[in-house]
Image (tube, rainbow, N blue to C red):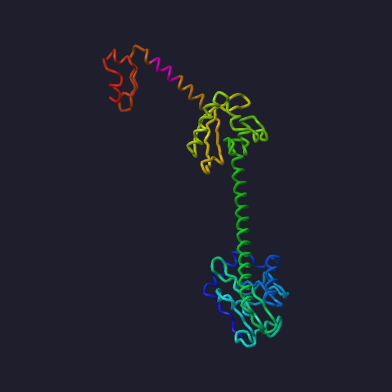
């Protein structure tokens, strides 16, 4: 008996095989259907989907055979993976030096005839074979060989589809987990966070928005964003939003008065919009109560205006200067007292 050689790319081949997470999984009808068809077309009592692992060949599907695996050193399929471009056919194992004294030929399951079409992955690695086995010597005709090749490609396609679906499910679970963690974080922050659909209706609101607006969550999720804007600012906010959409501005900031249980409250809002084909498909907003900031700002403006009027109407010269002594402000009285316009002395 001649033991099969180890492929030069064995490490990569095994990594590719393991990436499918197919080894030691349950039998599946889709694979069993293929082995049944292969056995029928090739007029053979046994047909297998064999995958060559490190020390064994394991059968994902087995038609006409009860065992689920055999040692790799005895596997005909371990020889077949060395010729990924061709079917390995052994018309009579007793006349082949590689298999004449192989225990699988001399004993159960009495493999006298073997034909294996390699299962070549999308990465170009031979993972195993779709093979047919008989207890008597024989040879496949050309139509049977072509059919075996076609069915082996179907097995590979099933493996690829299975891996792709698993990866998609994993990606979906990861996305759901990430979104859950993100939502948990924004549930705890003090800023108002929301998401709008393409028509401007709320599809998500966090507890801060519920608290600040005074509307219960179930009611907010039936409302349009404009329903929360105080009528005084409604037109200005609407024009701003139309302009943002028209110019496809992805990020913008706006301050306006929002309805609340105790009357309008100023909020500063940042909006992020995702555009597809010039249409805003998703809108995310983060708003903060800036009522105290606005009131403080208004007080400062009022105080500034008061000082300005005081300075302008005072007969005394009032000035401000930088640490270096240069003037930064001079009241209009400087012209009467010194004969200079205020701006002539700024910076001196």
Quadrant of residue 306 in the image?
A: top left
- Main SS category, magenta section: helix
Q: Is residue 166 magenta?
A: no
The residue positioned farthest toward the top in the image shown: 315
User: Where is residue 20 shown, x and y percent of the image?
Assistant: 61, 64
Q: Residue 222 placed where, x, y %?
A: 65, 34
- Where, by quadrant of the figure, is residue 205 drawn? top right
* Image side of residue 41 versus residue 10, left or right: right
Indicate left or right for 177 with 33 as reference. left
Give the answer, above or below, for where 136 lies relative to 192. below
Relative placement, left or right, of 315 versus 274 is left
Query: Between residues 150 and 168, which one lies in front from this camera angle?
Result: 150
The region drawn magenta spans 303-310
**Residue 129 makes an appearance in the image:** no
* Residue 29 placement: quadrant: bottom right
Question: Magenta stretch containing residue 304, yes or no?
Answer: yes
Q: Position of residue 167 (x, y in %)?
A: 60, 58
Q: Identify the residue at horizontal 69%, vertical 80% (top origin).
A: 134
Residue depicted at x 56% and y 79%: 5
Asked whether 91 or 42 is in front, the reply is 42
Residue furthest out toward the bottom:
95
Vertical relation: 305 (above or below) 126: above
Question: In front here: 81 or 312?
Answer: 81
- Give the total number of marks visible in the rendering: 0
**Residue at the limit of the structure toward the left, as seen here:** 339
Residue 121 makes an appearance in the image: yes
From the image, which quarter does the C terminus lie in? top left
Residue 57 in the image, given as x and y percentages of width and height: 64, 74
Quadrant containing the N terminus is bottom right
């Amino acid at each position: 008996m001649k033991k099969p050689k180890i492929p030069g790319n064995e490490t990569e081949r095994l990594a590719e095989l393991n990436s499918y997470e197919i080894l030691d999984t349950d039998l599946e009808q889709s694979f069993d259907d293929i082995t049944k068809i292969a056995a029928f077309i090739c007029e053979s009592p046994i047909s297998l989907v064999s995958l060559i692992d490190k020390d064994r060949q394991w059968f994902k599907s087995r038609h006409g055979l009860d065992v689920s695996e055999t040692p790799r050193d005895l596997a005909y399929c371990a020889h077949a993976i060395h010729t990924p471009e061709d079917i390995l056919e052994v018309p009579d194992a007793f006349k082949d030096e590689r298999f004449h004294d192989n225990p699988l030929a001399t004993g159960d399951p009495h493999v006298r005839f073997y034909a294996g079409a390699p299962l070549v992955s999308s990465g170009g690695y031979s993972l195993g074979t779709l093979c047919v086995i008989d207890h008597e010597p024989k040879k496949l005709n050309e139509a049977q060989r072509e059919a075996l090749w076609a069915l082996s490609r179907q097995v590979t396609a099933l493996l690829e589809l299975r891996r792709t679906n698993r990866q998609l499910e994993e990606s979906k679970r990861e996305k759901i987990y990430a979104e859950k963690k993100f939502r948990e974080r924004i549930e705890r922050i003090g800023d108002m966070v929301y998401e709008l659909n393409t028509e401007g209706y709320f599809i998500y609101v966090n507890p801060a928005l519920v608290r600040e607006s005074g509307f219960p969550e179930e009611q907010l999720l039936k409302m349009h964003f404009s329903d929360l804007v105080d009528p005084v600012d409604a037109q200005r906010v609407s024009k701003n939003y139309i302009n943002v959409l028209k110019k496809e501005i992805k990020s913008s900031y706006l301050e306006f008065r929002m309805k609340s249980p105790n009357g309008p409250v100023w909020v500063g809002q940042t909006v992020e919009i995702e555009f597809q084909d010039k249409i805003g498909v998703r809108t995310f907003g983060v708003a903060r109560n800036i009522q105290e900031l606005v009131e403080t700002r208004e007080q400062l403006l009022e105080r500034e205006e008061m000082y300005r009027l005081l300075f302008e109407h005072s007969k005394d010269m009032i000035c401000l200067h930088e640490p270096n002594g240069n003037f930064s402000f001079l009241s209009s009285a400087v012209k009467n007292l010194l004969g200079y316009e205020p701006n002539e002395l700024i910076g001196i």
